[in-house]
Image: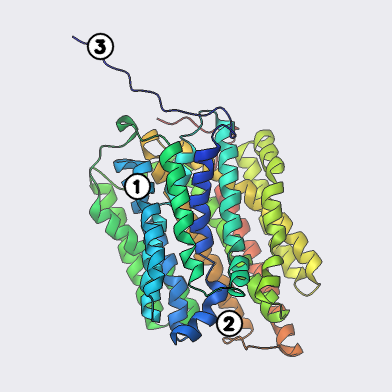
Amino acid sequence: MSPTTAPAPIRTYGSLRAAWIPLAALCLAFFVEMVDSTLLTVALPTIGRDLGSGTTTLQWVTGAYSLTFAGLLLTSGSLADRLGRRRVLLVGLAAFGVTSLAVLAVDSGGDLIALRAALGVAAAGTAPITNSLIFRLFDDEALQTRAMTVMIVVGMSGFILGPLLGGTALAHVSWTWLLLVNAPIALVAWIGVRLGVPADRTEDLTGDRLDLLGAVLSVAAIGLACYSLTSGVEHGWLSVTTVGSVLGAVVALVAFLAHERRTPDPMLDLAVFADDTVRGATIAQVGTSVAMAGVMFGMVLHFQYAYGWSPVRAGLANLPLILTMILATPVSEALGKRLGHRLACLVGAALLAGSLAGLAWSVDHGYLPIAVCMVVLTVGLRTVMTICAVALVLAMSRNRTSMGAALNDTAQEVGASLGTAVVGTLVAALVTTTLPAGRWSGELVASFFHGERVTYAVLAVLVGLVAGWGALTLTASRQTDERD
């Protein structure tokens, strides 16, 4: 009888510098996906003129991407855990790059909506997997946390920089270049992943069958839920469209939960939510994204409409967010090490709520107090996002890490939709349903500031409750519970 051959160990790295090729490739893949979600925002008026598109069409140019992306994250994580994480990521990057080239054939608003929906599908095949593969590069938890910190900084910087990069580029080139540039970036990321990230071992994958019905139901539930929030702002919360999409989301969610409990090979094993770390991190990530998206959306309106700043200047006004994302690393790491996950995330939640309350006061006191609140907000974001992302993935079994990352990303997408919906609804209710172009009157600006004060006060309470609830559910330890 021959001895059992032990599986070959996966190559890991002893420092971030030693892993710079695969780490840079994974960060680049995450960056292009995040920047693409906001890059076209400032180009919408130009796109509307070039393609002869109306307001509804332009809303779907951005909405099509976010809906397919959010809806397919769990499905993508499930596929990666079964077929191989690197394999699915390479396919996703290739699809993202090739699909971006199709912008050359776009000659109508409908074509662009279809293209953006396809890009959302490809991006869903990259986002959770890049986060999952980060943990494959290192054995040491401190290095894993530091690498995830780098990933979050790069990704969030792309999200924030999107409008600035788009506005700057539009001054020199056609809007089509904003999508064409994805192709070479995706190619470079593909080469880096192919050369630097080891292939998955069979024993690190799950042998469960693909849960196709679960995938369809999850896409329907998440997609309809996110669309309901957008529709509520656009059509009204009691409109037939909004009520119908809410009911559809509820039905799909109930059917998904019932199916996942019955099937022997569930796409998402609901038992994972019995784990305090998984449940708490997922809830807290919803809170962080409510804060992030609410402030980003609110400040776009504030700087460009109330202040009358250009898109480039408004983008530069967000630099405190980016700089703090980079410089807050020692603070976030120190909080996690000294206080443990629960207390550190509670501190982060308090910073989020406090910064939003500060914005409620500072909106009519000039840019400086707003910038200070942005700095405090970002420290809270960095602390909660990093700790929860690392804790959530490491709390999953080794053959479910992509699903853990997908849960993290899905929670953030739902939170982002909720934050945008809260701001959009309150501005429409308290100020105006139509934001006039050109210079605003003093009366409208004063009304807008009042609406912002109420909006950020509501967000402060909402984020404090959600992020705080998630933080309280986390374990008190400084180390993530071991995986199965």
SS for dot 1:
helix
Look at discs 1 and 3 and give the one toward the viewer.
Answer: 1
> Percent x, y for residue 157?
61, 56
Extreme-top residue of the structure:
1
Task: Name the foreground residue: 62 vs 169.
Answer: 169
The secondary element bearing badge 3 is classed as loop
- Residue at 57%, 58% (x, y): give it: 158
Secondary-structure class at tag 2: helix
Left or right: residue 463 versus residue 443 is left
Camera-near label (2 vs 1) is 1
Which numbered disc, 3 or 2, marks the residue that appears first in the sequence?
3
Mark 3 to mark 2: distance in Å?
A: 70 Å
Q: Percent position (x, y) of residue 15?
A: 58, 30
Of badges 3 and 2, nearer the viewer stands: 3
In the depicted structure, whether residue 176 falls above or below residue 388: below
The disc, 2 or 1, on the residue closer to the chain's N-terminal end is 1
Identify residue type, mark 3.
Pro
Callout 1 environment at 10 Å: few (<14), some (14 to 19), or many (20+)?
many
Indicate the quadrant containing the N terminus: top left, top right, bottom left or bottom right: top left
Residue 88 is marked as 1
Quick one: quadrant of the C terminus? Answer: top left
Residue at numbered disc 2: 428
The residue that mark 3 highlights is 3
Q: Is residue 325 left or right of residue 277?
A: right
Find out whether the residues at labels 3 and 2 contact each other: C-beta distance under 8 Å. Answer: no
Image mark for residue 464: none
Quick one: label 2, few (<14), some, or many (20+) residues within 10 Å? some
Q: Residue at x 36, y 57 (%)?
A: 95
